[in-house]
Image: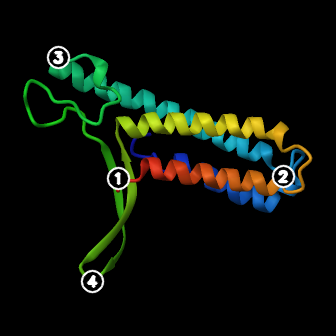
Amino acid sequence: MLESAWIIPAIPVLSFVLILFFGKRMPRQGSEIGIIAIGTSFVLACVTAVQWIQRVENASSKEGLGALAAFGKGFIAHGSEDPIVRPVITTITWFHLGHIKVTAGTQIDGLAVMMLFVVTLISLLVHIYSTAYMHGDVRYTYFYAALSLFSASMLTLVVAPN
């Protein structure tokens, strides 16, 4: 999951599109799509966190360190300058413009894993709370579409490599 972290923000983007096209026809006007999507992203963020912690523990056991470095960006061992656990960076070249190469991708490190967990958890709670708060509002479906798009934007910022 560390190499496929782009899926976590892609799920709320998909829910945004589904809510816009099918939200008014759904029994709860699209809120169920948003809640399921962000719930799925939360589960995937938890899986990513577990994989990151295992990665840190594997590196720590090789170097004789504890697992305290799990959510650090890098950890310096025995006076060396090299971090034990390097971030997982996945990029693709989007386009070239002269000598400039524009890339898109993800960077997963300890901070990104922690923020994925926090952002998906808070977004899930907001999605659930908003079902009662927005009940009866004229733009209920639009609100859930916008909330899904906002969640996707926050998650994209969290995993962005630059």
Residue pointed to by mark 3: 64
**Crowd tier of the residue under label 3, counting other residues whose Cα lies within 10 Å: few below 14, some 14–19, many 20 or above:** few
Residue pointed to by mark 1: 90
Mark 1 or mark 4, earlier in chain: 1
Residue 42 place in picture, x, y as percent: 58, 35
Nearest to the eye among marks 3 and 2: give it.
2
Whether pointer 2 and pointer 4 mark residues with C-beta atoms closer than 8 Å, the reply is no
Q: Amino acid at mark 1?
A: Thr
**In the drawing, does residue 5 fall left or right of residue 148?**
left
Residue pointed to by mark 4: 98
**In the drawing, does residue 61 fall left or right of residue 27?**
left
Residue 34 place in picture, x, y as percent: 72, 46
State the image quarter where residue 109 is shown: top left
Residue 84 place in picture, x, y as percent: 19, 32
Whether pointer 3 and pointer 4 mark residues with C-beta atoms closer than 8 Å, the reply is no
Whether pointer 3 and pointer 2 mark residues with C-beta atoms closer than 8 Å, the reply is no
**Which image quadrant: the C terminus?**
bottom left
Q: Amino acid at mark 4?
A: Gly
Residue at 79%, 62% (x, y): give it: 21
The answer to whether residue 10 shows anywhere in this view is no
Q: Amino acid at mark 2?
A: Tyr
**In the drawing, does residue 77 fall left or right of residue 130?**
left
Mark 2 or mark 4, earlier in chain: 4
Mark 1 or mark 3, earlier in chain: 3
Whether pointer 1 and pointer 4 mark residues with C-beta atoms closer than 8 Å, the reply is no
Residue at 25%, 16% (x, y): give it: 66
Residue pointed to by mark 2: 140
Between the residue at mark 1 and the residue at mark 3, the CA separation in whole angstroms equals 28 Å
Between the residue at mark 1 and the residue at mark 4, the CA separation in whole angstroms equals 23 Å
Between the residue at mark 3 and the residue at mark 4, the CA separation in whole angstroms equals 47 Å
